[in-house]
Amino acid sequence: MTSRQKPPDIFLSMPHPCSYLPGRTATTLFIDPRYPLDGRTYGYFTRRGFRRSGDLIYRPHCRSCSECVPVRIPVARFRPNRSQKRIWKKNRDVTVTARNPGFVEEHFDLYLRYQEKRHTGGGMDDPDPQKYLDFLVSRQVDTTFYEMRLDKRLVGVAVVDHLPDGLSAVYTFFDPDEQARGLGTYAVLWEAEHARKLGLSRLYLGYWIKESPKMTYKTSYRPLEGYRNGRWVTLVS
């Protein structure tokens, strides 16, 4: 955000059930959706812990809870562990290709299969193409859909936003029948390496919650930085 640009209005949602920790109530800060965003402004808010879902730029803001910690990998210092090295080697035959954001039937079919097998009942398995696009695509953000293919067969899609200082991993879905390949881990490793090749310094991974078993995997990427009390600090080294 430039010094001449008027800052956007930021709103606080009504209390609602927490989507991360069952039985808890949450509130969320979100930027006025009418505010014209560009890459620099979006990067500014990402560096301050905000996240994107479609056109909505948001950040958890709960009075009695601070469990949602924005995290990122400093890619120049990142070193994969043994398990990650094995996954990288196992997927040497996977080809990654950039695609412009938008609806592709092949992507959507894989997305629905992934949701059905991995997140049944989570509310994201709605077979509505428009809801799928509303979740992953923004009209104001530079986004790429990176296809992962084994020979010619689509096995995964990593949705990534491009920021002035790094990449932001928006969402990844992959073939649930290829569980042994660790494609979710491979996607993060590939994104970190791609950011490094582009001369960028960070890969943003969204939120980490210590109490959420589904998010434990994020602390395996080391070093990992977290945004706490208005500054980025090392969570695990």
Image (spheres, rainbow, N blue to C red):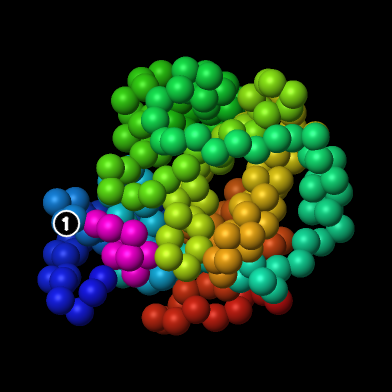
Tell me where residue 50 sits by quadrant.
bottom left
* Residue 73 placement (x, y as % from top left): 60, 66
Tell me: 178 left or right of 205: right
Start and end of the magenta stretch?
Answer: 37-44
Using a 10 Å C-alpha cutoff, classify the residue at mark 1 as few (fewer than 14 neighbours), some (14 to 19) or many (20 or more). few
**At which x and y percent is residue 173?**
57, 35
Decide which of 22, 224 is in the foreground and name it.
Answer: 224
Is residue 131 something one can see in this rendering?
Answer: yes
Element on which disc 1 rests: loop
Name which residue type carries label 1.
Answer: Tyr
Q: Magenta stretch containing residue 39, yes or no?
A: yes
- Location of residue 26 in the rendering, given as x and y in whole percent from the top left corner: 33, 57
Q: Quadrant of the N terminus?
A: bottom left
Q: Mark 1 points at which residue?
A: 35
Looking at the picture, does residue 180 appear above or below residue 228? above
> Where 77 sits versus 140, above or below?
below
Residue found 60% across the figure and 49% down from its top:
214
Determine which quarter of the picture holds residue 11.
Answer: bottom left
Side (left or right) of 85 relative to 178: right
Residue at left offset 70%, top offset 35%: 95
Please name whichever residue, 2 or 88, is drawn nearer the observer in this view of the structure: 2
Q: Where is residue 42 in the image (x, y as percent from the top left)?
A: 33, 61
